[in-house]
Image: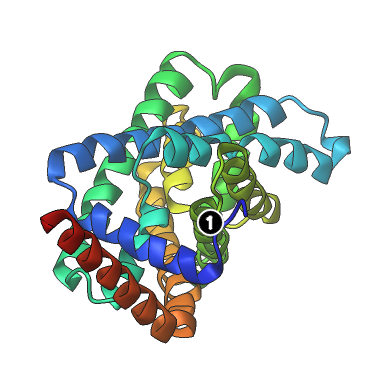
Amino acid sequence: MDYYSPLEIANTSIQKGTEKANLSKFPLMFLGFLGGAFIAVGYLAYIRVTGTMPHEWGSLVTFIGASVFPIGLICILLGGGELLTGNMMAVSIAFYAKKITFTQLLINWLLITFTNLLGALFVAYFFGHFVGLTEGAFLEKTVATAQAKVNDPFWVALVSGIGCNWLVSMAVWLCYGAKDFFGKILGIWFPTMTFVLIGFQHVVANMFIIPAAIFAGGLSWSAFLPNVIPVFLGNAIGGSIFVSLIYFMAYKRNIAKLENQSNREEEVIKKARAV
C-alpha cells in the first residue's frame, strides 16, 4: 500500500502540527524565510514562462504557468520550509486535538507570516527587481497580475483566499498521505496547479507579486495591506475550517482510538525493553 488512509493522514497532520508549534523560534524563522522564498520562486517561474506568451493563446497561457508554480510548495514540503498556508491547516488540527494551546498557534502563524514575507520580499527585490527578472519584457505581465489581485474588493479577496487554501491545504494533506517521493510530488502538484488555474488568491504568493510590481513602479505600497489582510483571513478559514476542522470532526473518535492504540503499543515496547 503506497498511501495512508484519510484517518492516518489526520493523525499525521496532528503530529506535524504539534511539531511545528513546538519548534524553537530560530529554526522556525529560517524555515519560514525559505518558505516565502520558495513560493516566490514558483511565482517567478510562472511570470517567466507566461510573460511573453501571445495573448491570443488565452487560458492556455495560465495552464502552462500554473504547471510550473507548484515547484515552490514541492521545495517546501520535500526539501524543508515552513509555509503559513500549510501551517493554517496542520497547526490548527493540532489545536483541535488539544495537543497545543491557542497561544502556540498564534505565535506560529504570526512568526511564519513575518518570515514568509521576508523571503518573498527578498526574491521580489533581488531576483525580480535587481536582476530584472520581473521587469523588462516581463513588466507588463508582472504589473497586470498584481493589479488583478489588488483590484478585488475585500470580500471577494477573502472568499478567493478561502478557495485557495482549501486546495493548498489539500495539497499538504495529500503529501502527508503519500509514502514515496513521487507520490508526494503528485499529491502536491495537482491541487496547487488547480488553485493557480482558477485564479484564487494566496497570501504568501501575493507577498511576492505585489511588491514585485511596486519595486518596478507599477503599484504603490498603499495597495499592499488592503489585499494581504482579506486574503490572509480567507486563507486561514480555508485551511483551518474547510480542511482541518472538517476532517478532525469526521475522524475525531477514530483519531482517539488510533492514539490509544499507539500509546498501548509504546507501553508494550517500553516494558519489553525494561525486561
Horizontal side of 49 relative to 136 (left or right) equals right
Label 1 belongs to which residue? 177
What amino acid is found at the position of numbered circle 1 in the picture?
Gly
Q: Quadrant of residue 104?
A: bottom left
Task: Give the farthest residue toward the top.
Answer: 131
What residue lies at 20% left-to-right and 67% top-to-bottom? 267
What residue lies at 34% left-to-right and 65% top-to-bottom? 14
Q: Nearer the viewer, residue 188 or 48?
A: 188
Q: Nearer the viewer, residue 272 or 177?
A: 272
**Is residue 77 placed above or below 271 in the rendered structure?**
above
Q: Tell me if I can see residue 266 in this picture.
A: yes
**Is residue 140 placed above or below 113 in the rendered structure?**
above
Quarter in which the C terminus is drawn = bottom left
What residue lies at 56% left-to-right and 66% top-to-bottom? 5
Q: Quadrant of residue 211?
A: top left
Task: Give the farthest residue toward the front.
Answer: 275
Q: Tell me if I can see residue 219 in this picture.
A: no
Few, some or many residues within 10 Å of mark 1 (<14, 14–19, 20+)? many
Q: Which color scheme did the rendering employ for the protein? A: rainbow
Is label 1 in a helix, a strand or a loop? helix
Q: Position of residue 174 (x, y in %)?
A: 56, 56
Q: Position of residue 38 (x, y in %)?
A: 44, 33
Q: Position of residue 169 (x, y in %)?
A: 50, 59
